[in-house]
Image (cartoon, rainbow, N blue to C red):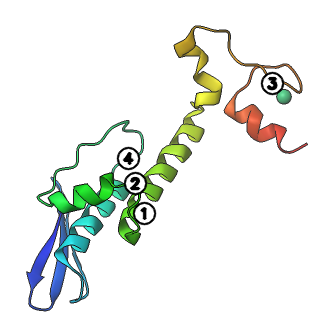
Amino acid sequence: MDGGSGNCKGSVIRWTSDDESYTFGLPGITSVFTAELLAINKALNIVSPNYRSILICSDSYSAFQALENFYSKHPVVIDCRKSRREEVVLCRLRLGHTRITHEYLMSGEAPPLCTRCNCRMTVHHILREGED
Ligand SMILES: [Zn+2]
């Protein structure tokens, strides 16, 4: 995945894997900086949220600086954080592994119990409990 200058008409994002290759054209006014951020965002949306950590390689130091800057208001930086976070949360809910339900494994304490019905606290139970 790479973002950068494509030709005189604008920037492009190129993505290549073993069996697939895509090129996304970007408007001519798109800066190389934004193209790099869009390439990283595209990669984050393609990579499965099952991975706990991802290694992102880019030749844009300024893109990484922007992603590390918690106060960045750049819309693509915000979207990168949001989309990855949402994917991770949805994946954890699907797997049933959340901090609330599984922190006891790290602390060595007993599994958490529901304060309403005293049964074992699971993601399924939390979601079902909301129906009452
Ligand atoms: Zn309950």
Are circles 3 and 2 on residues that touch, CB within 8 Å?
no
Front position among marks 4 and 2? 2
Lower position in the chain sequence, tag 1 or tag 3 = 1
The quarter of the picture where the N terminus appears is bottom left
Lower position in the chain sequence, tag 3 or tag 4 = 4
Distance between mark 3 and mark 2 Cα atoms: 35 Å
Q: Secondary structure at mark 3?
A: loop
Q: Tell me the crowding category of disc 2: few under 14, some 14 to 19, or many 20 or more residues within 10 angstroms, Cα based.
A: few
- Give amino acid for label 3: Cys
Q: Which residue is mark 2?
A: 70
Q: Which residue is mark 3?
A: 114
Lower position in the chain sequence, tag 1 or tag 2 = 2
Could you tell me residue 68's position as x and y percent?
31, 52
Front position among marks 1 and 2? 2
Q: Ligand 1 near label 3 (Cβ, under 8 Å)?
A: yes
The quarter of the picture where the C terminus appears is top right
Q: Which residue is drawn at the image coordinates 11% and 58% (left, top)?
A: 59
Distance between mark 4 and mark 2 Cα atoms: 24 Å
Closer to us: 68 or 3: 68
Marker disc for residue 78:
1
Front position among marks 1 and 3? 1
Distance between mark 3 and mark 4 Cα atoms: 31 Å
- Give the image quarter of residue 101: top right
Q: Which residue is mark 4?
A: 48
Q: Quadrant of ligand 1?
A: top right
Could you tell me residue 100's position as x and y percent?
64, 29
